[in-house]
Amino acid sequence: MKSSLGLVENLFSKVSGCFNEQSAEALVALRADDKTTAMSEEIADKSREGLLNAEEQRQYQEFAQAVSFVSVLQAKARVYLRELRHSA
């Protein structure tokens, strides 16, 4: 049986296998908009103060997981672009 890390790495490999130069550059440049940033800062502040209700806690966890997922994909996109440019 594969470890969960193996399953996650397999998923990331499949997604990063879809990169081309344009998609990798777009992913690297991806940033949250002002509204999302403000909302995440607000919920992070409430979390630090221990003031999140159950729904806010769920949203905060979902957001943190999404940020982690996108961050790993961005790192893979940077590697892809570096290798692409190095081989050119």
Image: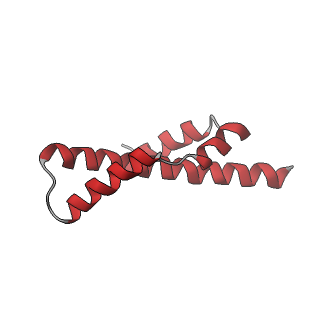
Left or right of 77: which side holds 55? left
Which residue is at a point 27% across and 49% down the rendered structure image? 61
Residue 64, x across and y down, in percent? 34, 51
Q: Does residue 19 appear anywhere in the picture?
A: yes
- Looking at the image, which is closer to me, 8 or 44? 44
- Looking at the image, which is closer to me, 80 or 22? 22
In the displayed image of the protein, which residue is found farthest to the right? 88
Left or right of 58: which side holds 16? right
Which residue is at a point 80% across and 52% down the rendered structure image? 85
Residue 6 position (above or below residue 11): below
Q: Does residue 6 appear anywhere in the picture?
A: no
Residue 47 position (above or below residue 22): below
Residue 35, x across and y down, in percent? 40, 45
In the displayed image of the protein, which residue is found farthest to the bottom? 49
Scheme by which the image is coloured: secondary structure
Residue 38 position (above or below residue 50): above
Left or right of 11: which side holds 57? left
